Image (spheres, grey):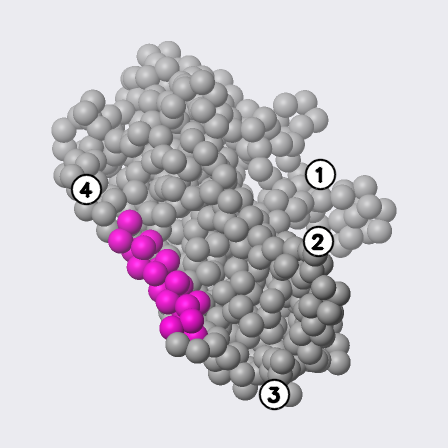
Amino acid sequence: MTRLDLRRLHPWFSLAHRRHGGVLAGLAGLACALAQPPFGLLPGLLGYAALMALLDGASVERPMRSAFWRGWLAGTAYFLVAIWWVSEAFMVDVAEHGWQAPFAVAGLAAGLGLFWGGAGLAYRLLAAKLILHRSLWRLGAFTALLSLTEWLRGHVLTGFPWDLPGETWRAGDAISQMASLVGVYGLSFLTLFAAASPAASDRAARGPRRWLGPVLGAAVLLGMQAYGLARLGAPQALPSAQARADGRTVRVVQANVAQAAKWDAAAFTDIVQRYTRLTAQPQHGRAPDMVIWSETAIPALVEDYMAPGAWTRTAIADALSPGQVLLFGADRADGPNYYNSLLILQREAEGFRLLGRYDKHHLVPFGEYFPMESLATWTGLKALVHVGDGFTPGPAAQVLAAGPVPPLVPMICYEGLFPGAVADGGRRAEWIVNVSNDAWFGKTSGPLQHYNMARYRAIEEGLPMARATPTGVSAVVDAYGRPVAELGSGAFGLIDQVIPKALPPTIFHICGDLAFWVLIFAGLTPVFLSRIVAAPRPGASMASYLRLHKMADDARQGGFD
């Protein structure tokens, strides 16, 4: 049997064997990142196909090192584009923290790139176990391993699942509806499979088998589109059918308060007046049932500005009508502990009644808490980056039932990134309330990315969402992830909207990430099957067994480990 030359498998290998494979890997990661919203350059998804080809064509002399290096470079380039907005947070106080910005962005991107580097290394290790002329099997392994490392990225050190591959599709569009079935991790697998499939064209095969990988990838893409169009085209999905039967209305307030103003004591009165003026603004018809302010709307401890006799308490009370409910983000203290909370207060004739409270469970690493704090304190790293004692996490989110407020799922800022974070607690929620402070990231791509990702939670759960931020994007979103009304970055204003109705529990809500793990198993099964095929069977001649291993050795010489 002639030796298998991997460079004949598909045309991408002519790129992979150049001297500048690392540069090409970086460009592949850059292309993938530019496919994400708000850029939306969807042809960039072919960067995943380029990455798979580059891993297949890693250096023969040091294939494992080369594969890790190329995966890491692709991931680092991807995350430099995806999270460059982090630098804006350091510009709030340029004199004190501005110097940290380039190190923070580069360090975070390089650290997140390790996940892609690990995927590249694992792919090379496992690809050597496959029957190498079956390009479809390699496609499954590549997709499964990169999807698995993206899942790990969403869980290690509490996780940072920013810009997952499945979130490339703008939330509310047809393909994004697949999240209601398989969640965003499952959608990431399907997206990677379709995007990388051009690299699975098998030039060594004859006839239709040559194009089996790309054809299956196209079929997956078309199937996702067809499902989404059918879901959005159903009678119950028509915009005219989205309003709740009871007509409960919500007012979302966006006061357009820049982050720097929150540190300026002279601006405190103006901030309070911005929120109260929008809250009290009259509207045609009856007043809204509920008003939502952003995360940490008022830059002080809630025990101080809502204390009896405080002018701020009086101002907030005057802005609300008796019976109205205010949902707002606030920092609060309880003994030595500090919490980032969502409070629900109802205006009464003589003041306020606390209806409910949620303390943020999923804290931001290095922003609201410091991972491995004791080690960081001992080494001096914690003092270097000026992180204080941080917040204390609250219990995991549950459905919050608060008097006249429809049962809701509370999500504070960063928590809107995490799929499957909604628990029933014995009662089905009717909407999601997401309060966030995206003012930290100015008018960069960050708030737009965050808004897109948060809307995926509405699709996954089949629940509408009301979202309030100080500077945008604030919105009311239906259960399909489509904006009903929104305020863009830098807008000062409000949204008055009837809350859209909830859908029956979705498949993802019922089964969670089960479909994702089934896909991972399917993608990696050929690795184990190839081991079975390569093992000697009872009654088989030793000569045939040796021929199988000779074929594998020849294949490795053709480019694999």
- The part of the chain drawn in magenta is 208-227
Q: Which label sits on residue 234? A: 4
Q: CA distance from mark 4 to mark 3?
A: 51 Å
Comparing 249 with 531, the one in front is 531
Spatial CA span between label 1 and label 2: 65 Å
- Image quadrant holding the N terminus, namely bottom right
User: Residue at position x 29%, y 32% from top?
Assistant: 503
Whole-Å distance between the Cαs marked 4 and 2?
Answer: 56 Å
Residue in the picture at 47% in, 77% down:
205
Q: Nearer the viewer, mark 2 or mark 3?
A: 2
Q: Give me the disc on residue 18.
A: 3
Element carrying mark 3: loop
**Which amino acid type is marked by label 2?**
Pro
Marks 4 and 1 close (CB-CB < 8 Å): no
Local SS, label 2: loop
Residue receiving disc 2: 538
Residue 326 picture location, percent across and down = 37, 26
The disc labelled 4 sits on which kind of residue? Ala
